[in-house]
Image (cartoon, grey):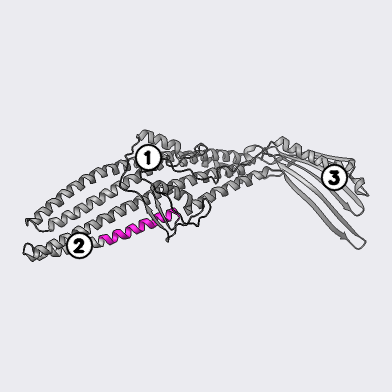
């Protein structure tokens, strides 16, 4: 019984010692598939309505089919962040990257390998049988050490052999150090951070797209109403021209001119209806709806003033932009890769140690006494003396390090230009609102004057038609200016990195 205890307990104690000296290692796939936070500071002051979904709904994060839904802007954004199909696919990529970290960390786990074999061999004289089984355990430590313990028992012919073996391999030059041995794990963690950053950047782009599509519906709806009123006024002008022609107060040319304007107004009305339908379908796609679903929005042309100090906006961008954070991490990564490439230029030289207790005998009980000992210690090397490939990779890594620094500086300059451009665009659209608002006032005065002159017979309807076209242009331009201003506010927040909240670990 004592011999059997030796065979079983000694490997267990050895593995316990291996695990104890290496420390514990946990892989936490935190935040790889967490629910995206609601967008920060994206409301335009519109009122939202309650949802009325159909009875058939899927689980959280899945597409929910609706017959009809009414959205405010914040509701539309929140819905898109939960149901946009492309965003769900991007979230899956984050989960994949998390599992890659898990798989890379598994290289440092204890490996348990059962072994068994059975064979028959012979020749012209006799035939022998052999059989055996065993259990091997090994662990790779972060600084390159490979430790293993195994127990084996075998029978060959009439002889039983039982052994408990311990082995250790320690790199002394190439392969020594945590940075070298944890390279795959660090690469996978870097890839996970980048996938999480990419997911947030996709959220930001999606929010901007939703705001643009939402306000495009507002724009097209207002333009549609504007063209409907224009068609009604044009029809009124045509009827007036016909009535004046019958009593001889105007010529046939005025009637023809009014008829042409009416046809143009009707054509513009058809185009406006088509544009409105396209805008609704575009928002449906972003929200994850099908073409059979009906959606409506609650919004108007109201807006809030938004401004930010240019220096403060630039400071926000430098601290919050995820592409800058990635570029900073890239500098650290290429520096680490440079050290690994330098380590690869060293020759392979390993310290190899082994210790074994074994026994043999005519029976399993006799062999399990483990009364014999063997041990080894030595150095092993196997390497290319010239190391041409490794030296070339080291020189390339030097170039990568220099390029990473240049690219970071270039990206900082690019971000600064983007912030300035976003600020200029915001200010331009704000001024356009004032300009077009004033233009509407002038156009209204021009229209009233033209109507008065036409009614009193002081002018034909040419001025009336020209004034009608002017007010349509002014009111359409005003609608575009307001919706562009709302969108440019969100684009500025995206540019400075305040549109979506992000954890600090992604900004380091």
If you read the primary sequence from the N terminus, does the residue marked by circle 3 or circle 1 appear first? 3
Q: Mark 1 points at which residue?
A: 419
At numbered mark 2, what does the secondary structure look like: helix, strand or loop? helix
Q: Position of residue 161 (x, y in %)?
A: 88, 48
- Give the quadrant of the N terminus: top right
Q: Position of residue 137 (x, y in %)?
A: 76, 44
Which residue appears at 53% of the width and 42% of the height? 193
**The magenta stretch spans residue 279:** yes
Camera-side mark, 2 or 1 = 2
Q: Position of residue 304 (x, y in %)?
A: 32, 41
Camera-side mark, 3 or 2 = 2
What type of secondary structure mainly makes up the magenta span?
A: helix
If you read the primary sequence from the N terminus, does the residue marked by circle 2 or circle 1 appear first? 2
Q: What stretch is highlighted in magenta?
A: 268-288
Mark 2 closeness class: few <14, some 14–19, many ≥20 residues within 10 Å: many
Instruction: Answer yes or no: is residue 255 visible.
Output: yes
Q: How many marks?
A: 3
Which residue appears at 91% of the width and 55% of the height? 157
If you read the primary sequence from the N terminus, does the residue marked by circle 3 or circle 2 appear first? 3
Q: Position of residue 423 (x, y in %)?
A: 34, 40
């Amino acid at each position: 019984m004592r011999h059997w205890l030796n065979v079983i307990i000694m490997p267990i104690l050895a593995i316990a010692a291996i695990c104890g000296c290496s420390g514990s290692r946990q892989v936490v796939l935190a935040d790889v598939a967490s629910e995206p936070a609601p967008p920060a500071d994206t409301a335009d002051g519109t009122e939202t309505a309650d949802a009325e979904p159909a009875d058939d709904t899927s689980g959280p994060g899945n597409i929910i089919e609706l017959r009809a839904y009414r959205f405010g802007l914040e509701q539309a954004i929140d819905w898109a962040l939960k149901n946009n199909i492309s965003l769900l696919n991007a979230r899956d990529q984050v989960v994949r990257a998390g599992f890659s970290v898990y798989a890379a960390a598994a290289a440092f786990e204890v490996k348990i390998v059962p072994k068994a074999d059975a064979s028959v061999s012979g020749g012209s004289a006799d035939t022998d049988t052999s059989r055996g089984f065993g259990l091997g355990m090994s662990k790779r430590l972060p600084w390159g050490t490979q430790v293993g313990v195994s127990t084996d028992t075998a029978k060959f012919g009439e002889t039983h052999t039982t052994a408990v073996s311990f082995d250790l391999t320690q790199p002394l030059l190439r392969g020594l150090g945590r940075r070298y041995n944890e390279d795959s794990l660090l690469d996978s963690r870097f890839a996970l951070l980048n996938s999480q950053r990419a997911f947030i950047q996709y959220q930001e782009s999606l929010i901007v797209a939703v705001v643009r599509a939402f306000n495009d519906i507002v724009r097209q709806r207002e333009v549609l109403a504007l063209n409907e009123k224009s068609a009604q006024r044009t029809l009124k002008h045509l009827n007036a021209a016909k009535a004046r022609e019958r009593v001889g107060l105007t010529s046939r040319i005025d009637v023809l001119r009014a008829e042409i304007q009416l046809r143009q107004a009707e054509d513009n009305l058809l185009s406006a209806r088509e544009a409105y339908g396209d805008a609704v379908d575009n928002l449906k796609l972003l929200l994850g709806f099908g073409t059979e679903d009906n959606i409506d929005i609650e919004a108007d042309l109201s807006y809030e003033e938004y401004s930010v100090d240019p220096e403060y906006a630039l400071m926000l961008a430098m601290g919050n932009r995820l592409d800058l954070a990635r570029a900073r991490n890239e500098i650290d990564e290429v520096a680490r890769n440079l050290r690994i490439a330098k380590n690869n230029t060293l020759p392979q030289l390993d310290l190899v140690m082994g210790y074994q207790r074994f026994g043999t005998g005519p029976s399993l009980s006799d062999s399990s006494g483990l009364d014999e000992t063997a041990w080894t210690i030595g150095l092993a090397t196997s390497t290319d003396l010239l190391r041409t490939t490794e030296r070339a990779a080291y020189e390339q890594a030097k170039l990568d390090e220099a390029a990473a620094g240049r690219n970071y500086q270039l990206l900082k300059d690019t971000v600064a230009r983007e912030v300035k451009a976003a600020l200029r665009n915001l200010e331009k659209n704000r001024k356009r609102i004032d300009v077009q608002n004033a233009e509407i006032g002038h156009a209204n005065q021009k229209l009233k004057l033209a109507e008065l002159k036409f009614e009193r017979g002081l002018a034909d309807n040419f001025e009336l038609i020209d004034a009608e076209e002017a007010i349509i242009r002014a009111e359409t331009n005003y609608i575009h200016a307001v919706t562009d201003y709302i969108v440019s506010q969100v684009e500025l927040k995206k540019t400075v990195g305040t549109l979506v909240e992000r954890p600090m670990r992604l900004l380091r």
